[in-house]
Image: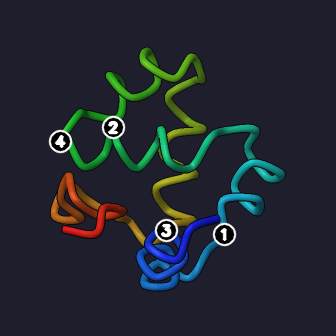
Amino acid sequence: MTDNRKGSLSKIDVSASQIKKEFGVDLYLFLDAVSLGLRDDEIADLIGIDFDKVKKIRERLGNISSEIGINFKKNI
């Protein structure tokens, strides 16, 4: 994990491996979709998981929203 990712994820107090283990989802793909402002049903379709799982992941991440911004893991 890069320092950029570690720093950004510490703000939401979760690790990519925890989300992968709990939900079988790539956290960075999920956060990219959220940062683009996609709705939960669109995220579910994009990632290939069911809608309820998206809601559970979002809840696990502290109800994170698109305010995270597209640059959440980039050092700009």
Give the residue pinned by disc 2.
Answer: 33
Residue at the image point whose x is 46% and y is 78% from the top: 12
Distance between mark 1 and mark 2 Cα atoms: 17 Å
Question: Does the CB distance between marks 3 and 1 fall below 8 Å?
Answer: no
Q: Give the class, few, some or many, for how many residues have Cα within 10 Å of label 3's Cα (few <14, many ≥20).
A: some
- Looking at marks 1 and 4 on the same chain, the residue that comes earlier in the sequence is marked by 1
Give the residue pinned by disc 3.
Answer: 5
- Looking at marks 4 and 3 on the same chain, the residue that comes earlier in the sequence is marked by 3
Where residue 5 sits in the image (x, y, percent)?
Answer: 49, 68
Where residue 44 sits in the image (x, y, percent)?
Answer: 46, 24
Q: Amino acid at mark 2?
A: Ala
Q: Amino acid at mark 1?
A: Ser
Numbered circle sitting on residue 15: 1
- Looking at marks 3 and 2 on the same chain, the residue that comes earlier in the sequence is marked by 3
Give the residue pinned by disc 4.
Answer: 37
Question: Does the CB distance between marks 1 and 4 fall below 8 Å?
Answer: no
Q: Secondary structure at mark 1?
A: loop
Q: Of tags 1 and 4, which is closer to the observer?
A: 1
